[in-house]
Image: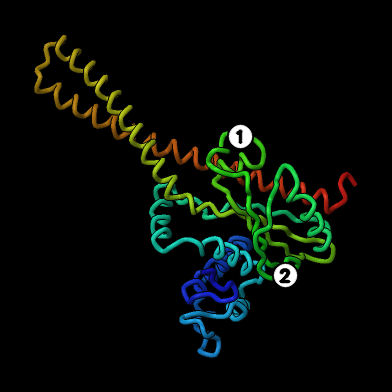
Amino acid sequence: MTRDPAHLTEEEANRLWQRAAQLQAEAARRSEALAITEGTAELDEEMRTGVPDGYALEHVRAAALEAGIGGTYVEEALADLLADRVATPRLRRSQRIARRMLGDPPPTVTARRVIRADAGEVLRAMEAVLPAAPYHLVLRDRHGDPAQGGAMVFDIPDAGFAGAGKGGFAGHASFADLRQVYVNLREVDAGTCELTVRGPVAWAYPLNAGFSLVFTGMGTGLGLAAGSGVAALVGAGGAALGIGVGLTFPAALLFVAAGGGLGALSGRKGFRALHRYGLQRGTGALENLLGAVAMKAEGGWG
């Protein structure tokens, strides 16, 4: 059964406050995370809803604002939370392990752009650009007023594992493990808006961790083979020089072990680099999408 998006569990509320504070800290280049504790302490029983261990979303927003966290970052954190809500606790635990294996990549791929147009013009541009080629995005859900920072959820129907080798928006999205994008629009000042597009990618981290193990195993095998080859050369050289087997055998073991270790390290680092490249392709695809919306909203060549 689909859970009510207007209610969050206590754990989800805490995660939303923490993520919103992190986003604000990154944007402003200063730490605001301590405000989360103060905002949490100010919550009382009157803010609780009929949902066990939960809060009304409007109260979560209000507490974040009272703690000094900007509404924009609250909405961005909410978008991340909605993307993560479909994950089971078991999947979230496996994602945490996978992130360590992958070098702690971000949970979402994000792109932002300031557009010189009001919210209505940007929304009309999105209606024209997003469903059309080459993006073909399909609106799945909406949370709040899109013109006031609400989140819109779009599917990427052409994205999938089979499309990772293709070009175009769907191909880049596939390579980055993007299957949905969350869009937020906020007004910066009169006639100027900031459009943010983010796509959750943490859902694929356990799978990518498995690929990382495969690459590590392949690297280990190649390293052991290389180490064995070096050990054989060392042994042959030792025999030619009349060095006893007691000296060459430990050296052979050392070369084999070193080759296997270096091979494993190279395989893991190689896959991490490939994974980062995929995320960069996804980011570039989202930036191109924002550019197309901006051109449409701002009047094209003018």
Task: Residue type at mark 1: give it.
Answer: Lys
Local crowd size for mark 1, using a 10 Å CA cut-off: few (<14), some (14–19), many (≥20) = some
Among the 4 quarters of the image, the one containing residue 148: bottom right
Which residue is the extreme one toward the top? 240
Local crowd size for mark 2, using a 10 Å CA cut-off: few (<14), some (14–19), many (≥20) = few
Picture residue at 70% right of the left edge, 67% below the top:
149
Question: How far from the left and from the top, in percent, is residue 26?
Answer: 59, 60
- The residue indicated by pointer 2 is 145
Viewer-nearest residue: 66 or 84:
84
Picture residue at 61% right of the left edge, 69% below the top:
74
Badge number at residue 166? 1
Question: How far from the left and from the top, in percent, is residue 95?
Answer: 43, 55
Do the CB atoms of the residues marked 2 and 1 lie less than 8 Å apart?
Answer: no
Task: Residue type at mark 2: give it.
Answer: Asp
**In this rendering, is residue 133 above or below 89?**
above
Which residue is the extreme one toward the front? 1
Element class at badge 2: loop
Question: How far from the left and from the top, in percent, is residue 256?
Answer: 24, 28
